[in-house]
Amino acid sequence: MAADFPTSVKTFTTKANDVDTIDASHINDLQDEVTAIETVLKGTVAVPATRVTTWTPTFAPTGGAFTSITYASQVGYQMRMAGVVFIQGSISLSAINTTGASGNIRISGLPVAGVANGAAISISQAQNWTTAAPAAGRTLGSQIQLFTNTNFAELPVANITATSNLVFTLFYFYTAT
């Protein structure tokens, strides 16, 4: 039997122990409905068995490129469900040469681009920056813009140091394909 979800919600008669006989169709109908719900929630995106996968966050300038950059650590976790991706990441540097880089600092490497810009991130740790550390951020396609706590200005390349680190979380919407 075809599932009714998502066009309607199927109703079932109340069963009582030792009174009603449970027919195989009762169980099959329930399985069809659960499958229909899972398909809608999951979309057509293949979800790994663990549902949590890794990704690699990187710092990137908006202009030019760093002459060199060495990461002490780059850790990122993601979980996608029903068109929402939950992100957790941390980046620590051990060396950087900003010659050749200009503009502002962004986090690149988001595992999937958002459907709209502006999902805010939560920064739980930002240490070893020069005059201003990242205090906020928002998604911009497959990158994260970083902002100072001064007039919500983008974080300039000049503020990153050889030992800068950042820990952040966010969730945003994406198009499940």
Image (cartoon, rainbow, N blue to C red):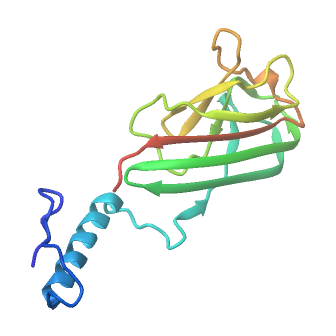
Quarter of the view holding residue 3 = bottom left
Residue shown at 84%/35% (left/top)? 164
In the image, farthest residue toward the top: 151
Image coords of residue 138 (percent x, y): 56, 29
* In the rendered image, the vertical position of residue 112 relative to residue 3, given as above or below: above
Q: Is residue 57 left or right of residue 74?
A: left
Image coords of residue 16 (percent x, y): 21, 81
Residue shown at 35%/61% (left/top)? 42
Residue shown at 40%/45% (left/top)? 174
* In the rendered image, the vertical position of residue 82 relative to residue 149, given as above or below: below
Residue shown at 88%/30% (left/top)? 128
Image coords of residue 121 (percent x, y): 59, 33
In the image, farthest residue toward the left: 1
Quarter of the view holding residue 12 = bottom left
Q: Is residue 134 left or right of residue 4?
A: right
Quarter of the view holding residue 5 = bottom left
In this rendering, the count of numbered labels is: 0
Quarter of the image that includes the N terminus: bottom left
Image coords of residue 137 (percent x, y): 61, 28
Quarter of the image that includes the C terminus: bottom left
Q: Is residue 53 left or right of residue 83?
A: right
